Image: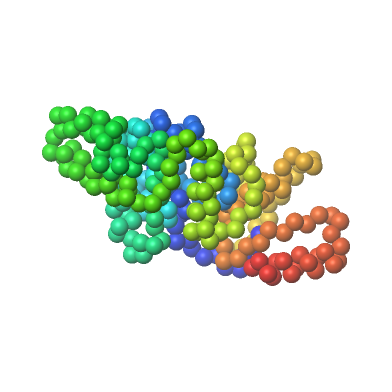
Amino acid sequence: MASSSISSRPHSYDVFLSFRGADTRKNFTDHLYNTLIAYGIRTFRDDEELQKGDDIKSGLSSAIQDSNLFLIIFSENYATSKWCLNELVRIIECTTAAADQACKRVIPVFYHVQPRDVGHQSGSFQDAFLNHEKDADQEIKESIAKWKIALEKAAKLSGYHVDNQHETEVIKKIREVILTRLNRKPLHVGDNIVGMDFHLKQLNSMIKTQREGVYMIGIYGIGGIGKTTIAMAIYNDISSQFDGSCFLLVDGKTSNSGLLELQKKLLQDT
């Protein structure tokens, strides 16, 4: 894949995932994240439990600023985390202050919780806030007021509900909506392919998309081990960074007439 010019991307990440790790890290969020990555959607996954302290660090704040869409996964214990609540406030502030608000959108996912509980801080959210309010100093009280406003705004937005239905069906709907908003037509490589993240990291370390020039990467091995699938996955991952892109399948049996068809496809796609 080559491009005569490389355009700067408006966002470093297509999607920013905000979630309570203890609730969904090993199930819904993990499945959602891997599905988005498999379809070439650049996704920032923040796990607040891997961070230290409750303040939004500059690196995370930059990731929020440089993201296009925000998936907020509200779960039973979401509001127990000051990190999650501060993150939500920053996301709402970012989308509200955006020059073109249509380009930044918050999509809430209500994972076994009701929007009214999120917006009105009832149920488990009420319990969490009662705990936050215990012995709260003035700074915490000010934060609590911001948290409540952010939760109320997010709960009013159109989103997705995960109750008793199959989670894979919800994830599929979210994926399609995101692809539509990003105007993408990714190559299908399958969901949750074991080891794909490792291969993508290796290939990305070799490909310098920020530099001018033409690069060639060889993927070799015996037949049937997934070379084409890996090539399709890396194409999905980086193709949006170029002004034009095309995925061409060529084998050793391609005839002259076949090469002509490949040329036509290249011109059509780019």
Q: Is residue 202 visible?
A: no
Examine the image and state in which quarter residue 216 appears.
bottom right
Viewer-side residue, 42 vs 121? 121
Query: Is residue 209 toward the left or the right of residue 50 in the image?
Result: right
Examine the image and state in which quarter residue 257 appears.
bottom right
Query: Is residue 249 toward the left or the right of residue 80 in the image?
Result: right
The extreme left residue here reads 138
Q: Position of residue 53 (x, y in %)?
A: 30, 34
Examine the image and state in which quarter residue 127 appears.
top left
Q: Position of residue 121 (x, y in %)?
A: 26, 38
For the N terminus, the quadrant is bottom right
The extreme front residue here reads 164
Q: Is residue 45 visible?
A: yes
Q: Is residue 173 above or below residue 2?
A: above
Viewer-side residue, 5 vs 41? 41
Q: Residue at x 49, y 53 (%)?
A: 178
Q: Is residue 193 above or below residue 270?
A: above
For the C terminus, the quadrant is bottom right
Q: Is residue 40 above or below residue 261?
A: above
Number of on-image labels: 0
Viewer-side residue, 156 vs 99? 156
Q: Position of residue 84 (x, y in %)?
A: 33, 39
Q: Position of residue 183 (x, y in %)?
A: 53, 61
Coloration of the structure image:
rainbow
Q: Residue at x 29, y 50 (%)?
A: 153
Q: Residue at x 35, y 61 (%)?
A: 101
Viewer-side residue, 97 vs 125? 125
Query: Is residue 49 toward the left or the right of residue 8 in the image?
Result: left
Q: Residue at x 29, y 33 (%)?
A: 123
